[in-house]
Structures are given as structure tokens and as C-alpha cells.
Image: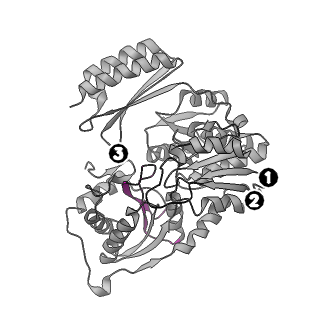
Amino acid sequence: MSRKYFGTDGVRGKVGSPPMTVDFALRLASAAARVLVPNGGSVLIGKDTRLSGYMFEAALEAGFVAAGVDARMIGPLPTPGIAYMTQYFKCDFGVVISASHNLYDDNGIKFFDASGGKLSDAVEAEIERQLQEPALTRESKALGRAVRVDKSRTVYQSFCAASVPQGMNLAGMKLVVDCANGAGYKVAPRIFADLGAEVIPIGCSPNGRNINDGCGSTALGLLQLMVPGAGAHAGIALDGDGDRVLMVDHLGRIVDGDQLLYVIAAARLAEGNLRGPVVGTVMSNLGLELAFRQLDVEFRRAAVGDRYVLGMLRESGGMLGGESSGHLLCLDKTTTGDGIVSALQVLAAMKQSGRTLAELSAGVKRYPQVLINVRVERRFKPQESEAVQEAVRVIEADLQDAGRVVLRASGTEPVIRVMLEGREEAVIRRHAEALAEVVRRAAP
């Protein structure tokens, strides 16, 4: 069964428009309860700092309690923190209210299973099928209970801190930490400071409307100015829900997810602890693939989306993977993408090697990439268009082995992403613009 509401990362949309309404959230809770805990159970509910998070938290709480599910509300906490605390509390599943790196007028709802992993496509499809049923309200003696567990976030802080090698601290390091006015604003600065770093926090004053607004991993300008200006060793930028991280080196240069993945993998390799292939996505820079080839490390590409990276890691026995956007998976440390844990692995590599972030990331020589988002009336598979196929063949013949063409439909909005990569930016930009026009004409 195809999924109408669930995309690559849960349900997401504009607040006040279907499906992001109070009525839908309540019915979604009831449907999830029917599928995941038909005989009752427990759920952990967390969120980021969006104004609408309170509204959806109340709706989900009502839906779960009415269906006989005990609900624990932990408040603002990074998405990976919800995954970890779901296991800690031995809940049957967890729910995160967040739209990740989007601005505040969007929101979303995503689920974790009892092990902190994402639900399968089949389970999400069954939840959607149950949405056709009215919301369930059990009799009084069968109702669930609701309780707040906000103070338990210190457990997650200890978990993150324990991800660095035993006995290591960050003493002598000065860090600028940008929390995007999002879910990590309480815990992230404290974690780095507790490990001994001098922390300059920014993006840590959420007001419900300023999440990801000119700050965090989607807007690194301020961080790039502050790191060299403050004489810091590095800057750390989380996104709104704390599952992604980008960094800035001491010179103010952006270090993206591909480069961070390389730094972590190279450190594991030097320790003799790297297991299996490293997994990126079809959007990972060609320079990353070539850098791993130099290290004699196998590199594989999955479809875009951390669930697909995770799936390939599990199939191949790998432990490290990620996306250029900074969604990194360190399966030797945690079960899901965690911006704080990933940043700590990079900082540990800096401490152990005595080298700067600029030096550690220099092994990746990035190829120019051009990405054009083609907005369409409705999603379609561009590869099935004969005109698009022919245009791609012509471009690939011109680029030969010195570039790549990637076409994919967004999992969260009606957009076709046209990405080209090659040695010469002017050449690939010309090809990308021409291909984007072909895609526009081919759209139904």
C-alpha cells in the first residue's frame, strides 16, 4: 500500500493545512496506538521549540491516552535524544514533533520504535489505513496516564558525553555552538561545557518563531564570522531538531557532512576500528568517493534519506554513513543520526591527532555541484519521461567519467531535484539549467 501522508521522515506540512491540523494529530495518535500497541502500552513524546509544538503535543497526548496508552512528555529535546530516551524508559515507541530544518510555520510528526529505530514503510502504511477509523476513546478504567519527564534530559546529556573515548575531555578547546533556536538549545552547550570546553552559545534563545531563522546548519554566516573572530577552534551548527550537524573550521570555512563523515571514518581507520563500508547517498560529493578510494575504504551510495543509509549500513555490516546535509550515522555510538554525538566524534579526532579541523578535512577535494529544485504541480518520476532520459544521455556523454547526473523527487514537497556534478562549474551549470527546463516541460 502506498503512503499518502508519511514521507521520508514522517508526516510534515504547513501548520493549519492538512495534514498538520489538531484533528489529524489526534486521529494519527489513535491510529498509531491501534497498530503499535493494540493492547495498551507506553509512548514518549518530545518536540522542538516551534510555537505549534504545544498544540500538537496536547493533541497527541489526548489521542494516546484515550486509546489506553501511557504518555510521557519530555519537552524540547533533539530527535536522537527522543530515540535514546524511548529505550531508556522502555517505552513501546516514541514520537517527535518537529519539522527539522524548516522554518517555524511548518511542523511534523515522526515515530521511533522501541529500539530507537524508524518504523518500516509497511507499518507506516498500516497506520495510514487505520486513519480511516474514528479516534478511539476507551472506558475510564482503560485510559492511559500522562506524566511530564522533562528533567530526565540529563540522562541524554550523559549518554552523549560518554560517546568520546574514556578519559578524554575537551579542555583547552574553545567552541562556538549554534543550536538554531531549536531542540538542542538546553542540552548541547551543557554537554560540550561539561566535557571541559569553553563554549560560546548562539541560537539558544527560542521564542517559538525563530527556529532555523538565520541560524543553525541552514544559515552558517554568523558562525563563520564568530569562530575566527573569537579565536575558537571550531564552530558547531545543529539544525532545528538536532539530528544534523555542520561545522566551521578555525578559518571560518564550512565543513559539510561529506567532510565530517570522512574525518570520523579516517579516525576510526587509524584506530583500527572501522568496520564495513562507509555509506553516503546519491547526492554525496564525488570528491568524498575519491577520498575514500585513496584510503582504500569501500564507499557505497544509498538513496537520499537517513533511513536508506541506515538500511544499507545494516545490510552491509557498516558502521558509518551520512548525507552532505550533516545527517551522520555513527552506529558504534548510537542508533540514529545525532548532531551532538557526531560533533563529539570530530572533536575527539581533533584531540587525539592534535590536528585542526581544517587539516583533518583537507583530504576531501570537493567537486562543484549545481542543484536546481524544479517545482511541479504533483510529484512524478522524471526518469520515466523519454525526453528527460534523452537529455540525461546527452549530458552524460559530454561529461563522460568526469561528472554525474542525479534526478530525484523530493520526499516532502512537490519538487524534482536536478543535480549535476563535475570538474568545471560553468559546464555543469549550463547542463543543469537545460535539464531543469526539460523536466519542467515533462511534468504532468
Which amino acid is tagged 2? Answer: Gly
* Picture residue at 47% right of the left edge, 46% below the top: 306
The image quadrant where one finds the C terminus is top left
Q: In the rendered view, does 407 fall on the left or right side of 190? A: left
Instruction: Give the residues drawn in magenta, as a range.
Output: 89-115
Q: In the rendered view, does 300 fall on the left or right side of 387? A: right
Q: For marks 1 and 3, give the CA distance.
A: 42 Å
Residue for badge 3: 412
Q: Position of residue 104 (x, y in %)?
A: 41, 54
Q: Position of residue 244 (x, y in %)?
A: 53, 49
Q: Earlier in the sequence, mark 1 or mark 2?
A: 1
Q: Mark 2 or mark 3: which is in front?
A: 2
Q: Mark 1 or mark 3: which is in front?
A: 1
Q: In the rendered view, does 86 fall on the left or right side of 2? A: right
* Picture residue at 55% right of the left edge, 25% below the top: 367
Which amino acid is tagged 1? Answer: Gly
Q: In which image quadrant can residue 179 be found?
A: bottom right
Residue for badge 1: 172
Outermost residue, top direction? 398
User: Is label 1 in contact with label 2 (beta carbons under 8 Å)?
Assistant: yes
Q: Is residue 186 magenta?
A: no
Q: Position of residue 332 (x, y in %)?
A: 61, 52
Residue for badge 2: 196
Which amino acid is tagged 3? Answer: Thr
Query: Pointer 3: residues within 10 angstroms few (<14), some, or many (20+)?
Result: some
